[in-house]
Image: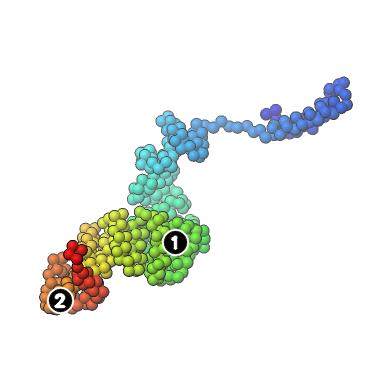
Amino acid sequence: MGHASMTDTMTDCLNADRVLQTLPGLPVARRRLARNLLVVLTILACACGGARVATRTQTPLEQALALRDEGHLPEAESALKALALQGDQAAALALAETMMLRGRHKEALALLQPRMSAEPNNPDIADLLARALDGAGLRDDAVTVYARRLTLVPNDAAAAVRMAELLMGRRDFVNAGAVAAAGLKLHPDHPGLHVQLARALLGRGRVPQALEEAHRATQLAPQSSEAWLTLGRVLTVAGELDMADTAYGKCLGLDPQHPEALRESGALLVEKGEGQKALAVLRRAIQVSPDSAEAWNVLAAARQHEHDLTGAIAALEQAMRLQPNTPQLFMNLAEVALEDGQPKRALAESAKARLLLRDNKGDPAAVTAAEELMERAITVAVVADSLCHHTKDAKRLQHDVDHDLAEHDLHATPEQVTKLGAQSEAAIRAAAARCSQPSKANP
């Protein structure tokens, strides 16, 4: 009956009573009981027979993929590896993807790169290889292969979003925006592409256009934390701090543990002068992302705003341990040290920043900023030392400043020194207070 059609089975069900008529000599009561039993059994058979369908035997590849879909990754990988060794090309690609699911992107590369060389126009291989390179941290190579994937499959929105993200990571705002804009021609309502275009436009200083794209992203995807985060960033640059605060709040309402939103919200609160609120938010940011140098840097700014200079210095030192050789961190530490009455440390940190910027052929404006900070530190140190020793010889002071500036390949006119001194009055007082204090060794 397992192979009978539903029609045949239903016919048997309806003819059950007729079957009983062929059984001679049964008493009426027994015939009625037998009829009832036969009807029940026939109905059950109908149900079983009607539910049965022919099943197709799975291929070994399908069995392996089923294991993977069920979460049995080691078993799936073993099965796929055996098939790949037998020359099953589809299994080899599935094996690479399974390795990636297990976090072994570099091993997947060993399988995919030769295949890409052999089949450069295979869009599936390009997709897998781009993701494997991305996961392995080879982001420049990943960009190249994502571009290949988009050449082969121009409407792959996911590849366009990720390629734009990677280009943004290396501050290539022009090409990031071009990739996002090209994707939007095919997917005009894709919120992720609007987010990437907004970020690229913001990177290029095109704030009104960035604001338009960010608003569009939140309209298309009001449940997207990334869309609200981007809108908050653009609004911050636009000077709309209250609206930016609202956008960050929307982001954190959707994802209370979003590390970037916590950090950006904390930085905004510092800018608004709400230092205590900023500290509370930034402590959460550190808890969520303790290895984020950016979060420690913003926490330092909040502590500095609240006049906790020792805490600010400690936060910056932690940021530098996490992200060494970052010129801006040295600059920030120099500023806090100067405010804390430590001009010699400020000079040392700003000199390191200048050296790093020069070695890396950094922005000339950043080099100039580092040198101006060095000049302030030197002026504060000399003037504070003069106050400590109660000397008021202007010529001697100018001589000492000129000498220290020359040692660091710097120069400032007497007028510039006077201006630097006036600008640094608070730092001079802090440094003078320190040098007048008795040392711990000689109380």
Residue 226 in which image quadrant: bottom left
Total marks shown come to: 2
Q: Position of residue 181 (x, y in %)?
A: 43, 59
Farthest residue, direction front: 443
Across and down, in percent, residue 281 comes to: 42, 62
231 relative to 53 in the view: left or right? left
Labelled disc at residue 229: 1
Q: Secondary structure at mark 1?
A: helix
147 displayed left or right of 373: right
Question: Which quadrant: the N terminus?
Answer: top right
Q: Can you say which quadrant of the picture contains the C terminus?
A: bottom left
Residue visible at 47% across and 64% down in the picture: 249
Q: Is residue 143 above or below residue 48?
A: below
Q: Alpha carbon of mark 2 to alpha carbon of mark 1: how far?
A: 54 Å
Residue at 63% over, 32% down: 54
Q: Which residue is mark 2?
A: 390
- The type of residue carrying mark 1 is Leu
Q: Residue at x 46, y 69 (%)?
A: 243
Between 85 and 27, the one nearer to me in the picture: 27
The amino acid at mark 2 is His
